[in-house]
Amino acid sequence: MTPVVEISADAETTGSRVAERIAALIEAKPDAVIGVATGSSPEPVYRALARHIDNGLDASAVSWFALDEYVGLPLGHPQSYRAVLERVLIDPLGLDAASLHVPDGAAADPDEAAQAYELALAGTTVDLQILGIGENGHIGFNEPGTPFTTTTHRAGLTRSTRMANARFFDSVDLVPAECLTQGLATIMRADRIELVAFGERKAAAVAAALCSPVTEQCPASILQTHPDVRFGVDADAAGGLREMHCVPG
Ligand code: F6R
């Protein structure tokens, strides 16, 4: 099935729509397993979800699984993805930090930590996975050229990804060069996927993901082969679709 594309006026509207679907999932399945991304794109979703909690949604039995984590940041570093997710998701929603699972990027043996995370994921089914997309088409931290068959693994970050994330650090050199990330095969096991992308900078990646041939050079293009994917984008991020006269879904 082709991914569905939902174009909204702005990021907050997309966030509200995605959060509504997540809230409906939690109401139907209180112990749902939800995969969460870090970065700027999903923040409107988490903000909108917090409003559902304020209005009485009970998410206390949900398990949350992060997509990825930097390797080498000390435990508790404010830019570690565990710390970020605690700040933008766990605390505002009033959830128990124990419900959040993140690969252990501070482990003495990161490869072993990647395997342990894959094992934890293998024992469950992610009901809904939230994704962002990199300007180069990465999902999770699966950079272009990553085999579609990968499971959770240790990976290097490209210079362009480190530069894109330098806004969260004092300089690009402080952005870790490695991460642990769910692999593309891991992500594809999720029952449902909601990818969100905003702004002109994401337009080319969104268009390549949806309208170009499925290729490892654009990791997000694998989503064309998933049975239940929705891209929630604003008008700017949809710009490349118009240019390519591509109207999926
Ligand atoms: C984050 C992640 C990445 C980001 C992507 C977009 O957990 O896995 O794939 O989703 O780099 O980042 P933002 O949303 O900050 O533009």
Image (cartoon, grey):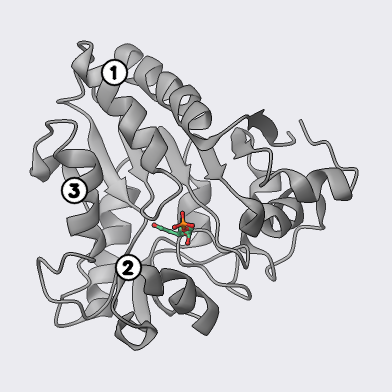
Q: Residue at coordinates 35% horizontally, 74% vertically from top-left?
A: 179
Q: Is residue 65 visible?
A: yes
**Depth order, front residue of 117/232:** 232
Give left or right: position of 105 versus 36. Answer: left
Look at discs 1 and 2 and give the one toward the viewer.
Answer: 2
Classify residue 69 by image quadrant.
bottom left
* C-alpha distance separating marks 1 and 2: 28 Å
How far apart in space, not on screen, are marks 3 and 1 (Cα)? Answer: 17 Å
Find disc 1 in the rendering and name its residue. 52
Which residue is located at x 68 percent, y 38 percent? 235
Mark closer to the observer (2, 3)? 2
Q: Type of residue at label 2?
A: Phe
Q: Pick the quarter of the image with the C terminus.
A: top right
> Which residue is more in the foreground, 208 or 67?
208
Looking at this view, is 53 or 172 the one in front?
172
For the question of whether residue 102 can be seen, the reply is no
Horizontal and vertical percent for residue 226?
A: 63, 42
Marks 1 & 2, CB-CB < 8 Å contact:
no
Q: Is mark 2 within 8 Å of ligand 1?
A: no
Direction right: furthest residue? 245
Q: Which residue is mark 3?
A: 87
Apparent side of residue 142 relative to residue 80 in the rendered image (left or right): right
Task: Kindly identify the amino acid type of the residue bearing the numbered disc 3.
Answer: Arg
- Any mark on residue 168, and which? 2
Task: Name the residue nearer the viewer: 63 or 200.
Answer: 200
Helix, strand or loop under label 3: helix
Tell me which residue sits at (10%, 65%) in the image. 76
Query: Mark 1 belongs to which amino acid?
Result: His
* Quadrant observed for ligand 1 in the rendered image: bottom left
Q: Is residue 230 above or below residue 221?
A: above
Rendering coords of residue 43 (x, y %): 37, 42
